[in-house]
Amino acid sequence: MKRRDVLKLLSLGAAGLSGGFFTIQLFNKEAPAIVFLTDQPTTDLFYVLKQLKQYSDYRISEQPISPVPQDATLFLHGKLTDPFADGTPHWFKTFTHQLRSRKRPATALIALEPETDIRKESIIIKSNGQIVDVLDVSRNYADIIVPVQMGKTHLSLQDGTISVTHASCKHKLCQKQGAISEGHLICAPNRLVVSLPRPSKFDALIG
Amino acid sequence: MKKNRLLRTHAYHTAILIGSVVFFLFLGCQKSSHTYRFTRFSMDTVIEYTVVSSDQQTALKAVNAAHQTIVTLDSLYWEENPTSPIFQLNHATNSVVLPDSVYQFLRRIQTYWKLTHGLFDPSVKPFLDLYGFEQDSPTPPTPEKIASVRPYVGFQHFHFQPGNRMAKEAPQNAIALGGVAKGYAVDRAVAVLQQMGIQAGIVNAGGDLRCWRADDNYWQVGIRHPRKQGLLAVLKLQNAAVATSGDYQRYYFYQNVRYHHLIDPRTGEPGRLSQSATVIAPTCETADAFATGLFIMGPRAGIAWLDSLNGIDGILVDSSGNVHTSRYIDRYIVELVK
């Protein structure tokens, strides 16, 4: 190997190492993540947080939705679990049962994610608990194809808002959710979760 | 010639190498700041800490210390905690000696009570208890019941005596610090975070928020609309506190009438002039107390009152949904839904 090549390799290596600093930190998978649809956001959120108090740090997002039945989903170690399966916490079974037995439609989607660092620029797409894509929120994509259990789901990212343009599930609730600029897009049948970064518009929400 | 070219090539590659190494070292050494967010539960609400720090460990350490302060204050100021001085005061027949910090806090409460012309009044507890907000299917009290406890409401029935002693005129006199204790706790938590070297951050205790930062940027804070989905306003804040009192925070419907927790000390009934009142003030304690006062005052008296105060601004949504703002609110507004 010539001296010139050694120098080239060294400079490439150094550049690569510096690039490594920007690697995105992935989710902490120890604590469960919970997403639920409710007509009583505050009361239910307090209840869930009381149950989760052994885990310290949660990123919570809340967004209004067009009316859908109330329900809850639980992600354990990054995987969506059956609420009534063995091993699911008892309180979560009760909570899910309670939500499903309510007659009024849900008006809000609440997501609790065990995470501390705010990633301001990345949209994370998870299918069946696995990260399948990470997008830069400032880019525009007319068609993002995500392979899911029931085929393919098509997403579109335009001006910081993401939407499902074609859903492969039966009820297409994810498609009906419309374009969102914060929080989460969820397709429960396909175990697809699209997490948007913290709202760039504001740093805190009160009222 | 050939030697010269070889030397130039070597010089070129050496420059790239040195440049890359310097760049790498620069990245390795510089302490870039990240924003970390932690969520905790205390004072019966969700407390969000947003802190700017060079590393997660420092941020976590500071947040843990700040949260410990809030937990301690919760046990001191929660009137239902049998060991709290406030519980002892409420259950005393005559007078009690209070810890200095609690005594001083109640002194400040007295100031807010006076400044809001008696409309922020923590001594409405006897009224509040009649509404049964803690019950599963509550019903509002009859006018007779309200009249029966009226003599015991009013902060003028509490007297500050030497030696941190607080006296009350009747055993039934009682106070509920509800909202304002949260504001005080936020102020204390911010002080702890600042002492631990956090240069910028937000503490948001279920809507009582205080933020600070040393640079020229702003924190953007969204305020929920009391009725509609979405936001009433987006504010830009640097070093300020903001609190909102709303009739949608703790309420029930009885015979299609909304009964909420913001009781008008004059009538013993929930304040009917506003849907929500937001106050921006230098401290969260002040913002909290004034938001309650502003809510009860309603648009006409409330906005005039805000404009008479220095450095205090606010937004009020009246009972018909109209939005009213104080004179100098524009300096904080990014967006306002009218």
Image: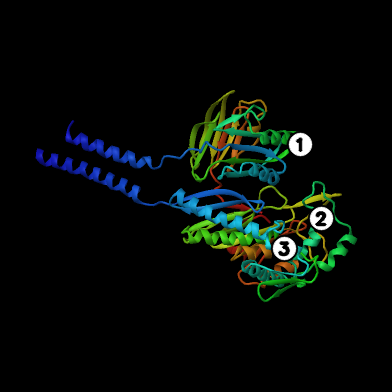
Within 10 Å of disc 1 (Cα), the crowding (few <14, some 14-19, many 20+) is: some
Q: Which residue is mark 3?
A: B88
Can you tell which mark lies on residue B131? 2
Estimate the x, y position of residue A51 in percent, counting from the top left.
Answer: 64, 41
Amino acid type shown at disc 2: Tyr
Q: Quadrant of the C terminus of chain A?
A: bottom right
**Badge 2 element:** helix
**Cα–Cα gap, marks 3 and 2:** 22 Å
**Badge 1 element:** loop
Quick check: can you spot residue B333?
no
Amino acid type shown at disc 3: Gln
Occupied quadrant, residue A57: top right
Q: Which residue is mark 1?
A: A102
Label 3: chain letter: B
Position above or below: B282 against B23: below
Residue in the foreground of this view, choosing between A190 and B48 = B48
User: Farthest residue in the bottom direction?
Assistant: B162
